Amino acid sequence: MAEIGILCHVSYTWCMAESSTISMNISLPEPLKRFVDGKVATGMYGSASEFVREAIREKLGRDQARAEASAALTANLIEGLDSGKGRRVTAAYIEHKKRKIRTGAGKSSR
C-alpha cells in the first residue's frame, strides 16, 4: 500500500521556556493524518499543531529520560569495576543472594 503524503502546518516550540515559535511543514501518511485529526476532533487538542507539539515534547522527555538512565547505568558499571577485586559468581552464589534478599524483604514488609 502506497503512503499518501499530506502536508500539515505545524508550529512548534523547541523548548517550553522559549516564547518564539517557528513554522514548519511536515508530510504525514494518510493514516497518521486521520489519527491526528481524530485527536483534534475529540476536543483534547485545539489544533493539529497543538497535538504535534505535545507529541514532540513527550518524545524529548523520553529521550532525556533514556539518556539519563544510560548515564546512570554507565556510572554504576564504572563504580562496580572500580570497587575492587571481582569474585566468581556461581549459580549457588546467586541463589544465596536471592535467599538473603527474600529474607530481608520479608522482615521489612511486616
Image (cartoon, rainbow, N blue to C red):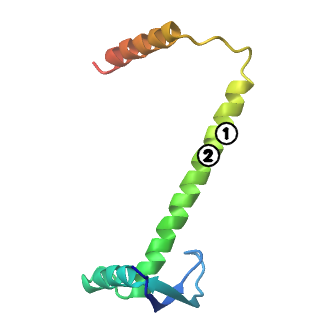
- Mark 1 touching mark 2, by CB under 8 A? yes
Query: Residue 47, which numbered label?
Result: none
Q: Which residue is depicted at the point 61% across and 46% down? A: 70
Q: Which residue is depicted at the point 62% across and 41% down? A: 72
Q: Amino acid at mark 1?
A: Thr
The quarter holding residue 3 reads bottom left
User: Is 35 positioned to the left or the right of 59 in the image?
Assistant: left
In the rendered image, residue 81, in percent from the top left (x then y), is placed at 72, 25
Callout 2 crowding tier (Cα within 10 Å): few <14, some 14–19, many ≥20: few
Extreme residue toward the left, this view: 42
Label 1 vs label 2: CA separation?
6 Å
Q: Which residue is depicted at the point 50% across and 70% down? A: 57
Callout 1 crowding tier (Cα within 10 Å): few <14, some 14–19, many ≥20: few
In the rendered image, residue 51, in percent from the top left (x then y), is placed at 40, 80
User: Is 99 positioned to the left or the right of 11 in the image?
Assistant: left
Query: Residue 74, which numbered label?
Result: 1
User: What residue would you read off at disc 2?
Assistant: 70
SS state under label 2: helix
Query: Which image quarter is the N terminus in?
Result: bottom left
* 45 or 17, nearer to the observer: 45
